[in-house]
Amino acid sequence: MSRYVISESDGRFRFDLMMEDKSDPRNEESVIKRDGFSTRDSCSDGITSVRRRAQNDRVYKRRSSENLSTGRTEYFFVMDPGLFSPVIAVSKMYLTAADRDMGIEWVKENAALAPI
């Protein structure tokens, strides 16, 4: 099960695409997010952009970063439609590249139909 959550803090809006924990449906985790929207409507437009582009593999930019506190490499992805377009969303951090790639597949399967 998946759903989008819109939240507001200090007059700025963000969305998270949440994934339900199959072992405990009361637990959810954010798979992708985007913040910094000035209005709720612009935040909703961001969700629409994710929904429209989720199936397109070319928007997923696979990245890695070193965690300075642990010294381990962590993996994430960015939904980036390309030249002259802003980043659509950023994923959570994953421990392996394989887990990151499974996260991309989950977004492809769930983002378009997830309710708000």
Image (cartoon, rainbow, N blue to C red):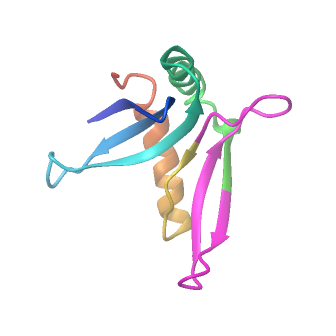
- The mark total stands at 0
- The picture places residue 6, in percent across and down from the top left corner, at 40, 29
List the single residue furthest toward the bottom. 71
- Residue at horizontal 49 percent and vertical 70 percent from the top: 95
Question: Does 85 lie within the magenta span?
Answer: yes
Question: Does 46 lie within the magenta span?
Answer: no
The quadrant of the picture occupied by the N terminus is top left
99 above or below 40? below
- Residue at horizontal 58 percent and vertical 24 percent from the top: 38
- The picture places residue 105, in percent across and down from the top left corner, at 48, 44
The magenta stretch is: 63-89
The quadrant of the picture occupied by the C terminus is top left
List the single residue furthest toward the top. 41
- The picture places residue 73, in percent across and down from the top left corner, at 60, 76
Give the quadrant of residue 112. Answer: top left
List the single residue furthest toward the front. 10
107 above or below 75? above
- Residue at horizontal 43 percent and vertical 43 percent from the top: 106
List the single residue furthest toward the right. 83
- The picture places residue 35, in percent across and down from the top left corner, at 55, 37
Foreground residue among 111 and 6: 6
Asked whether, in this view, residue 2 is left or right of residue 53, the answer is left
